[in-house]
């Protein structure tokens, strides 16, 4: 039986427990539960997060790298997981900050197992710094990856342009979400415009302006504190941090519509919340950015999807007003964009490695 080690950027124990009980979605496990059902022996570890001294010792190094490149480098995690990696048949790294150190360990021959490397955002930083020594260093490391998965066609294209030697091992696959978790509940009549998202692509300055222009509407934001730093919001905006997914699901199911303001970063952005919003049968008002339009040309044509020009508050207000008037009941095409299909695509790539 093929043994897979999954490497995550953050803790996954609680997430896995919730997914198995259907009290939380499984999509941030990157196919782990379904690959297990397909016959793989899957493993991961949260041990690293219970050893604060190790993390403290390596913290200055990672912060320096982040300052230079905007990308983390969890070398301490990779070192702690090396024994598990050596005992595995293949390693799947699910974020650049978690994957790059494993490529380094493979480069210096400490780890010799194949690595399936999932990337979001690294290539954009490399393109920005084409002549930087760090970019050359990343190219050297990426050569050690057996396969590279991107979640947007733009990132795949940028990889092939900047690293043409890697062309044959770069794949674009659609990210998939846990449809069962979201579509099991009835859609309620809502009274709030909901905006959910923790990644740095969010344009909450735009939302602040939109809320002022729509004073009679109630807005709810669920995000990370860093995304709203320095932004002043009007009284019709409520803000929450780190809500459990059960509450997030309830917000989706009791919303008037979902508003997803995004900055154009030329990479995968806002995809999870876009798919979740559609799975919960919401009208969705979302920025017209490549990470959405080029990844989901079919979904952006749905009657309950309203695209607005990124950064344009007038256009977004117009689309929100239009969406509030439209009563539709669309469903997301589950088979193409669910986490089970994502796992099947990962399994297909694994078969090429092993």
Image (tube, rainbow, N blue to C red):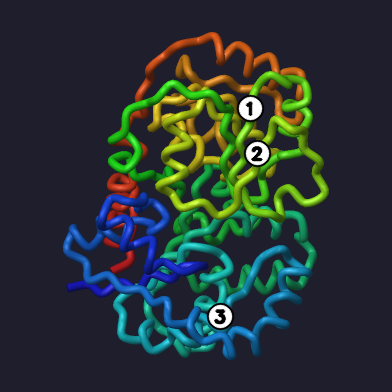
Callout 1: helix, strand or loop? strand
Callout 2: helix, strand or loop? strand
> How many neighbours does mark 1 have within 10 angstroms: few (below 14), some (14-19), or many (20 or more)?
some
Snapshot quadrant of residue 329: top left
User: Are the residues tagged 1 and 2 within 8 Å (C-beta)?
Assistant: yes
- Viewer-closest of 22 and 304: 22
Tell me the residue that label 1 is attached to.
218
Which badge, 3 or 1, comes first in the chain's sequence?
Answer: 3
> Eyeballing the image, is 291 above or below 6?
above
> Eyeballing the image, is 64 above or below 333?
below
> Which residue: 49% across, 26% down?
297
On-image quarter of the N terminus: bottom left
- The x and y percentages for residue 160 are 58, 52
- The x and y percentages for residue 234 are 77, 33
> Which residue: 50% across, 35% down?
274
Tell me the residue that label 2 is attached to.
238
Report the Cα–Cα distance between label 1 and label 2: 8 Å
- Viewer-closest of 203 and 148: 203
> How many neighbours does mark 3 have within 10 angstroms: few (below 14), some (14-19), or many (20 or more)?
many
- Looking at the image, residue 338 sits to the left or right of residue 123; the answer is left
- Looking at the image, residue 69 sits to the left or right of residue 242; the answer is right
Which badge, 1 or 2, comes first in the chain's sequence?
Answer: 1
Tell me the residue that label 3 is attached to.
104
Snapshot quadrant of residue 319: top right
């Amino acid at each position: 039986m093929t043994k897979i080690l999954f490497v995550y950027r953050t803790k996954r124990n609680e997430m896995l427990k919730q997914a198995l009980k259907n009290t939380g979605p499984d999509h941030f496990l990157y196919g782990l539960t379904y690959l297990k059902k397909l016959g793989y022996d899957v493993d991961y570890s949260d041990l690293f997060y219970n050893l604060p001294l190790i993390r403290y010792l390596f913290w200055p190094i990672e912060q320096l790298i982040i300052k230079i490149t905007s990308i983390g480098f969890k070398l301490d995690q990779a070192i702690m997981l090396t024994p598990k990696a050596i005992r595995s048949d293949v390693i799947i790294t699910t974020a650049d900050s978690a994957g790059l150190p494993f490529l380094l360990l493979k480069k210096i021959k400490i780890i010799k197992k194949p690595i399936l490397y999932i990337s979001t955002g690294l290539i954009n930083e490399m393109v920005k710094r084409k002549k930087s020594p760090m970019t050359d260093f990343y190219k050297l490391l990426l050569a050690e990856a057996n396969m590279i998965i991107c979640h947007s066609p733009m990132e795949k294209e940028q990889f092939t342009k900047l690293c043409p030697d890697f062309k044959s091992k770069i794949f674009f696959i659609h990210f998939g979400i846990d449809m069962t978790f979201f579509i099991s509940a009835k859609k309620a009549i809502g009274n709030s415009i909901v905006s959910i998202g923790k990644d740095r692509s969010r344009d909450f300055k735009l939302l602040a302006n939109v809320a002022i222009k729509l004073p009679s509407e109630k807005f709810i934001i669920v995000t990370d504190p860093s995304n709203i730093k320095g932004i002043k919001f009007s009284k019709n905006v409520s803000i929450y941090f780190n809500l459990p997914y059960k509450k997030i699901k309830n917000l989706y199911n009791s919303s008037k519509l979902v508003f997803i303001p995004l900055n154009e970063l030329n990479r995968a952005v806002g995809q999870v919340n876009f798919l979740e919003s559609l799975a919960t049968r919401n009208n969705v008002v979302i920025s017209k950015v490549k990470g959405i339009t080029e990844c989901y040309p079919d979904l952006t044509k749905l009657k309950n999807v309203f695209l607005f020009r990124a950064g344009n508050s007038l256009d977004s207000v117009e689309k929100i007003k239009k969406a509030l008037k439209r009563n539709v009941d669309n469903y997301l095409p589950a088979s193409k964009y669910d986490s089970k299909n994502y796992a099947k695509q990962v399994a297909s790539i694994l078969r090429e490695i092993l």
